[in-house]
Each structure stands twice: as structure tokens, then as C-alpha cells.
Image: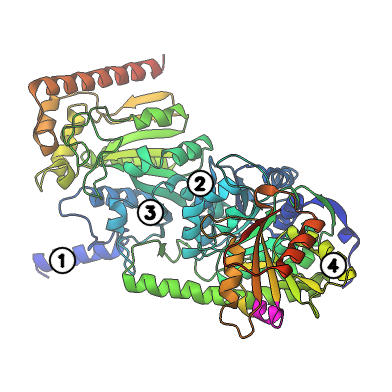
Amino acid sequence: MSTTPDEAPVLLTGNHAVAWGARLARPKVVPVYPITPQTPVLELLTDFQAAGEFDAEILTPESEHSVMSACIPASLAGVRVFTATASQGLLLMHELLHYASGARAPIVMANVNRTVASPWAFWPDQTDSLAQRDTGWIQYYVETAQEALDTVIQAFRVAEQALLPALVNLDAFYVSHALEPVSLPAQDRVDAYLPPFAPAQRLDTAAPSGWGNVVSPDMYNRHRQDIEAAMGRVAALAAEADREWAEATGRSWGVVERYRCDGATCVVVAMGSLCGTVREAVDALRDAGVAVGLLKLRLFRPLPAAALRAALADVPDVIVLDRDHSPGCGGVLHQELRAALYGMPGAPRIHGCLAGVGGLNVAPEHIEAFVRRALAGTPQPHSEWVR
Amino acid sequence: MNATIELKHQAAVAQAAAPAPLLCSGHAACPGCAEPLSLRHILDVLGPDTMAVIPPSCMAIIAGPQPYSSLRIPVYQPTLEASAAAASGLRRALDASGRQDTQVIVLAGDGGTYDIGLQCLSSAAERNENILYFCLDNEGYMNTGAQKSSSTPHFAVTGSTPAGKTTRKKNLLEIMAAHGIPYAASASVGHLADLRQKVEKAKAMRGLRLITLLIPCLDGWGLADDSALRTARHAVECGAYPLYEIEDGQRYTLNVTQRTRPVSDYLALQRRYRHMTAEATQRLQAEVDEGWARLRQRVAASAPA
């Protein structure tokens, strides 16, 4: 696919790439509340609007709770809705995250992964969004600014097809504030990829209906099964959305990505910005004769278990890096991987590493050391603190 | 055609010509409750180009369980604390869709307004969102079995104030007026013409408009089954619940200007005040007198010179 001149790369931070992705997706309503490190998303969107380049209703309520409360009925009225938050803001929305998926509102939200208080801290850590894994939101984790832009647009497409909300997660500072070359797709290219949101059922005075009335146990149970069925379609929809994006732009990110996994005796599984560091460690280890690969998990909810099993078949050792912490459980991704691979014939030995929790720097040489240590030891059921 | 048949014929013609009521019969309100009567008149004035946001409350029960709805307008039921935020989002979506003339209303209780919903209501008022907010004020958490809210008046017994509430009712209209919203008013189904006129007036305005309606709760206040309207009238007539309007946070209008009975008449109808001593009744009378005097001062101060 050829690029048009306006698609030549420009330097953008991850946050500004998110704002560009949102602008190109043409949402009609954007409720948003500022929180470090997400604020540049908000500020660039309001700049776009002030310049007459972004035709959306932006509202700035008093809290993230009210932001998500506004997002849901706006979406149910049949318009595309975008917002962005981080950390405490996402936690404050928790009640409404469940409400949004229950209402089948395909809102897209960017979340800048930041440590959760207390104590206060502002560093990259994915506990905020991983703690929302049971809320019924599709969850993506991105590694770069370009991927952040592309994923916001893809997420709208998948969310609107599945009628489920979607969260696009980017690590604080490493992705949100790092400047990288980003190609901005032309508006007509995005418009062709992402048709206007026009749900058949919506809040409309011409055909009055309601959402939220009390239901019976049987209706509630069937509704949960409908949500599960919709989630069950997401991995395939996400793969298809990514394939068509590749046709439109030449860029594909996958639902999972295998990096130098061929013939690997050990595969490191990670999400978000850690993947970039793992790539360097893999290259160094391969140069040193250790057959190591990276499996980048881009779609975390729904967990693409079939893709993970296929990618990790015949791999003797898997090392999971968690930049999150669930007390009493360890690393969330570690436990998710153990569950996904449980019972698999010839399942890999799974080593869980709590690496970079609280924003600790994880350098390529650290990852090389984790790999060598894991391969020399035996895997534990719990996740191990490493640094 | 004899006279009876002629009358029936005229009634049938009138019924066919009248639009279907927007609140259907068969709703789930308690027998004798004044809330559906209030709502019927509100919706009759507003008409069918209206969407309602109804948080958990008595009104949500009256709206009915799925798959039924007692309302012939679209209804969105948000979480308890989020009505004004949800209405804001709905409003903006309609604006973005070219539906600026559709009224977005909130039908919330006092718990969802004075207490848990006040933060987002304040924010919506600060943004002057174009919504019409009705607080159906029955002075407590009546839907959960009558516990105290910050709208419960001084001395009233509730499930969480068994010895009587020790503090006064929060003054919501003054709080809203301090935001400078275009319209804040109190109304009562006991004064129907006044209620309808206020809804008409609010309907014609834009920005955040708020009307509180006193809804005497038969069960929560301990009232006789047939006394909801009488109690609502007594509340206005003794000055415990004065009917007034505040425009742009400044211009006060008192709609019922005379007090025609003592507070004790109003208390006598209600079991929640049965424990009142003469001294407590005097104190409550003094508080109502004080509120009335302050209100009259504001009316006088805002009268054109």
C-alpha cells in the first residue's frame, strides 16, 4: 500500500498518537477528565476542537466516574464515544466499567498504565488495568506510539462489531511520553476502514425503549451469556480488523506477535513497553547462542488462549514478565498464562517474574539474567520478585 | 341517538383525539402515592419528544421491570450517583445528532440528588448542561425502607434516625441557585396549576433547570392512604415547603405568599413526628419561620425597583 504525502512519519508521543487516533476515528462525544500521565491526550483533543479540526462534543465533568457515566448513555444514543484516563481514574470508574459492558456500549478508552496508590507514585505499572480484567472490556496493550494510534482505530472497529467497550493500554512515560516517528493515516483511508457508528438499536424518541430496568434472574443470566458469546467473537474480529488495517496501511500488529520464536527453547511472554526491551535481550541471547524468543501479547481480554497454545506448543520453557502485582496471587499475566496452558499436552514449564513493578527500570541485561536464572532453576507456582 | 349514547360518543371522540398518556396505567407505584400523579402532569406538559434518566429510586420501580415500561418515552437508568452526568452525556449525543430540541429530563429521588448524586449535579450545573432535572423529594431513602437522607427534615423519625433526626434538611435550591443556573424552583402536586406552569416555563428555557417536588411518602412518613395530596398542601400552607422560583440564581419569586396554618397541623398528619414534644414542635415552627423570613427577604431584595 502506498502512503500519501501526509502519511510521511512525524514525531509524536504515545499520548499524542492516541489523540490523533481518536481524531481520525471521528467520535461525536468525548467526556474526559485530566490525570497524570494522560493529560496530553485531553489537551491535544481540545486543541484540535478549538482549531475547528475535531467535530466532537467535549465535556469535562468533575471526575472520571462522571466521565464514564456520561459515556454510556451517549453511546447508547447511537454515537461514537471516546475517552482517556489513567490509574486512579480508571479505578474510580470501576463500577461504570461493569455498567458499560452490561449496556453493550462500544466505548473506546485509552488508559495510560500508571502505579496505583497508596502510596502515591506515577510510574509505569499495569496493575490499574489488569485489575479491571473481569469488567467485560476488551483490553489491548501497545508497545509504541504508532501501535497506539493504529490500535485506537482498530479498537473502535472491533468494539462496534462486538458491541463491547474496549480499553487501549499504553505504559506511562515509556510509551505515553516518548517521541517516536508515527505515520498519520489519511482521513479518507480511516473513513473507509471505520464506517460511521449506526447501531440498529438505540435510545430514540421515535421508537421509545429503555435500558437498565430491573430484570429477572433468567434474563440476567441470558444477558451474561450474550456478553460471553460476544467476547468469544472478539479474538477473531481483532485478527480480522488487524489484517484489514494491514491492507489499508501496510501495518499489522497481530493479536499476539512471535518475535524470533522459531526453534526457541525458551519464550518470554510480555505486554506493552517491556516488549521492546525483550526484543533487545532476545537479539543478544540469540547472538550468544541461546535460542530465545518473545511472545508479545497485544490482546489481553479476551485472552487468546488458542493463539497462545499454538504459539507456545513445543516450547520447553516460558518466562512471563509481569509489570503488575496482585497481592496473594503474584503476577496477573503469569496466572492467566498458567490457566490458559493448563492441561495442554507437553505444556511448557512456566516461570513467573515480577519485573519492573512500580516502574523499576528493566534493562535488556536484566531480562537476559532472568532468562539464564529461570533456565537454571525449576519453575515455582508463585511469581518471583526479580530485578 | 339518546343522551347517554351521545355522551359516550363524545367521550370516545375526545379519547381518540387525545394523545396516549405518556405514563401508562398498571405502573408499580404504591396505592395512593402522589409520585405517578406528579409525573403524569410533568410528561403531559413536556410531550413525547423527551428522554428520561431515572436512577435507582421509587421512580425506577414505577417505570417497571423489563420487559415492561410504564413510560412511553425512552428511559436510561444509570447508577444511583450519576444521573446528572448520564443526562449530560445523553444531551451531548443528541446535540451531536441534530436533536437539540429533544428534552433530556432526570427523574431522581432526594437520596440520588441531595446525597450521592450532588457532586455530579454540581458539575453539570457549573457546565450549565441543557437538562431539566426533577428531584422527586420524599425526604428519605423510601425505596429501601425509609432511612434518613440529607433531605430528611429536623426531628423526623426514619429507619436510621429512630430518635428523630438531629439536624436540618439541606437547602438544595439555595445550593443550586449559588451555581447561577437559569431556573430552580420548588413545586407540589398539591398545587397542580403552579406545577404545570413551572414545567411549561422550564421547558421553554435552556441550560440546567431544576424543579424539586415534595412527594409525601405514605409508608415512610406514616400517612393515611388517602392523605398524600392533603399532606402536600399542608406542607406548602404552613411554610415548611414553600413554593418559589429562583431565576439565574438571583431573581426570587414566592408563588404562594401567605402561610395559612401552623406547622403543627402538618406534623399531625404524620407518624414520623408522633414523638414530638411541645418544645420540639415550637423549635421546628421557629425554624420554619426563620426560613420563611429569609425567603421573603430574598424576594424583596430581587424585586424590580
Q: Could you tell me the amino acid type at mark 2?
A: Ser
**Could you say whether the residue bearing mark 1 is in a helix, strand or loop?**
helix
Task: Look at discs 1 and 2 and give the one toward the viewer.
Answer: 2
Mark 3 residue element = loop
Residue under pointer 4: A285
Is A304 displayed left or right of A142 in the figure? left
Q: Are marks 1 and 3 on the same chain?
A: yes
Extent of the magenta region = A307-316
As drawn, A302 above or below B226? below
What crowding class fits label 3: few (fewer than 14 Cα within 10 Å), some (14-19), or many (20 or more)? some
Give the percent coordinates (x, y) of residue A254: 73, 72
Q: Which residue is mark 3?
A: B47
Residues at marks 1 and 2, CA–CA distance in whole angstroms: 53 Å
Look at the numbered discs 4 and 1 and tell me whether their residues touch, using CB distance below 8 Å.
no
In front here: A351 or A233? Answer: A351
Residue A160 shows in this picture:
no
* Residue to which mark 1 is pinned: B8
Q: Main secondary structure of the magenta part?
A: helix
Q: Is residue A309 magenta?
A: yes
Above or below, comparing residue A35 to residue A203 in the picture:
above
Q: CA distance from mark 2 to mark 4?
A: 49 Å
Residue A216 image-quadrant placement: bottom left
Q: Earlier in the sequence, mark 1 or mark 3?
A: 1
Question: In the rendered image, which residue does mark 2 sit on?
Answer: A66
Q: In the rendered structure, which amino acid carries the disc numbered 4?
A: Leu
Q: Amino acid at mark 1?
A: Lys
Rendered position, A148 above or below B259: below
Mark 2 and mark 1 in contact (Cβ < 8 Å)?
Answer: no
Do the dots labelled 3 and 4 sit on one chain?
no
